[in-house]
Amino acid sequence: MGSPILILELGAIILGLGILGRLAALIQLSPIPLYLLAGLMFGVGGAAPLETSEEFISVGAEIGVILLLLLLGLEYSADELITNLRRNYPGGIVDFVVNAAPGAIVGIILGWPIPGILAMAGVTYATSSGIAAKLLTDLGRLGNRETPIVLSLLVFEDLTMAIYLPILTALLAGVGFLGGSLTVLIAVAAVSVALIVALKFGRAINKIIFTNSDELLLLGVFGIVLIIAGIAQQLQVSDAVGAFLVGIALSGKVAESARAVLTPLRDLFAAVFFVFFGLRTDPRDIPSVLLIALVLVLVTAATKIGVGAWSAGRAGIALPGRVRAGMMLVPRGEFNIVIAGLATTAGLNQIGPLAATYVMMMAVLGPLLARFAAPLFRAFGKIRDSVRGPAGSPD
Amino acid sequence: MSNDESIEINETALPGIGLRHDFMTAKGQRIGVVSHRSGRRDILVYDRDDPDACSNTMTLSPEEADTVAEFLGTHRVTERLATLSDQVSSLRTHKVKVAHGSPYDGHPLGDAKVRTRTGASIVAVLREQEAIASPTPDFSLEGGDVLIVVGTDDALSSVDQIIAG
């Protein structure tokens, strides 16, 4: 068994995260930036580096990534993904181009190698669907007419991740052009096969896996996802994508029950993952990237707002709804850190501090914008109306 | 039931969440319902000044939604029967409308001898906005009534023929 210090350290970390989580809930913000901050404090070059628990945390972090993607996959059925892809690809492609570009450009300016540039593009591209979906619910916006547009952009991004992550993993592994193309082929084939299997045999698969016992369902689904993720990793397709595909293949009652039993597990290990990323990042590197991060924050907040507003406008939504749609897409979070984590693990240490700083700012700024944009906009409208002379104030 | 056709209902998929239905009331208020896959229901009231946004959203648990639906009318009864038939694979639920001028228009339900002749059961009668559960044989049918029948596929098609006359 491990030393008593290990258990003590783990307990302190988890309790610490619990307290931070409560603090985040109190001020109604995502806990992700706080978890990252905690990791920064306890990691390399931080205020109180950990001694013994790093190995456990590193394995826990890997499980965290797998569970993050599994639960993301559980949110969607293959039908939904395919319908969405068919209907909304123009918006999705614009979203990708406009929001991946700033990250890529920064990577190029900083003279990073190609995998680093690609990783940074992913960091600025993906909206945090976790934070955005929670905001939509919390702010009572599920019924709003712009919401389906926001959701479809999120779905498109998530599906893009399933193709993007294996490509990134392959490039990070430093395989040559031939090996790289092969991995990409395997990835595309795996995604297609998984979607087809889910569409054709989804019912049968779900029937086999379903059980009324929460315990057996937890063990079954968790075991399957780890095995598939492990196989995917062996094929260099990225364990995260394997987990995402398992999530898509499961649907109906299995997905619902699995979501219920796995969510607490995901929350625990995802928190560990954010801490791990923070641990691996040296806070002393942050001041030198602060300015770049700030520029990226401003630029990519604007590009996301632009894409959201444009997509909503195409769907005939009026100006206030367009603004809301744009603001809703600003938060970045878990997957941006997943991407940066992959790059860091592969030895691209430059990306960590920038990504951590960027995501911390975006995870705070995004929800604030989403929450206060609409009231500000309305207040602005009222001032304008009162200047023009009120024709009949609604109040 | 008949005013269904005059209401234009928008159905929108919310990927990852469920379905949204909304429509404009005669008085010009847009209202809607989000049906979450978990069974949760949100009742939506749209803002008159900003018709893309909801001015109010009420969240109902499945039980609360059932209760509200019961206060409002009969649709949920049929929906629940439909899920019942999903659970028992060989059983189907079916709606049979009693046409005006049908042989049973104005006659007691018992005259049709549905159960004896087909094995299917009439579990409810929908009349205007009301559902009459477990109607007795002396229940007098009227043109426009809708019978909710549970049975096997074969039995249900026989019921159709009997009621059509």
Image: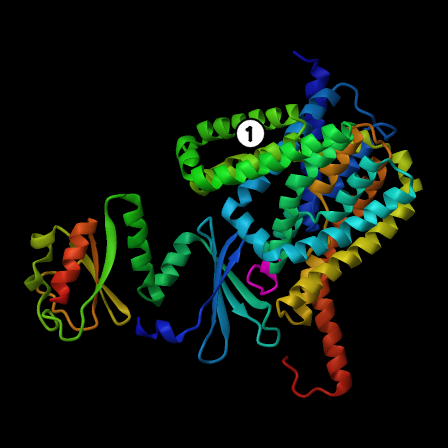
For the view shown, which residue lies furthest in the right direction?
Answer: A288
Where is the N terminus of chain A found, in terms of image quarters? Answer: top right
Looking at the picture, how far across and down is residue A153, in whole percent? 64, 54
- State whether residue A395 is above or below residue A293: below
Where is the C terminus of chain A found, in terms of image quarters? Answer: bottom right
Give the residue at x 37% y 59%: B67
Give the residue at x 81% y 45%: A358
Question: Which image quadrant is residue A339 in?
Answer: top right
Given residues A182 and A156, the one toward you in this image is A182
Start and end of the magenta stretch? A138-148
Residue designated by label 1: A225
Task: Give the dominant element type of the magenta stretch: helix, strand or loop.
Answer: loop
Report whether residue B16 is seen: no
Looking at the picture, how far across and down is residue A2, in whole percent? 68, 13
Report whether residue A74 is seen: yes
Pointer 1 chain:
A
Given residues A84 and A337, the one toward you in this image is A84
Mark 1: secondary structure: helix
Looking at the picture, how far across and down is residue A168, in whole percent? 74, 35
Q: Is residue B92 left or right of residue A324?
A: left
Looking at the picture, how far across and down is residue A273, in whole percent? 70, 32
Amino acid type of disc 1?
Answer: Val
- In the rendered structure, does residue A147 fall within the stretch colored magenta? yes
Question: Which image quadrant is residue A236 in?
Answer: top right
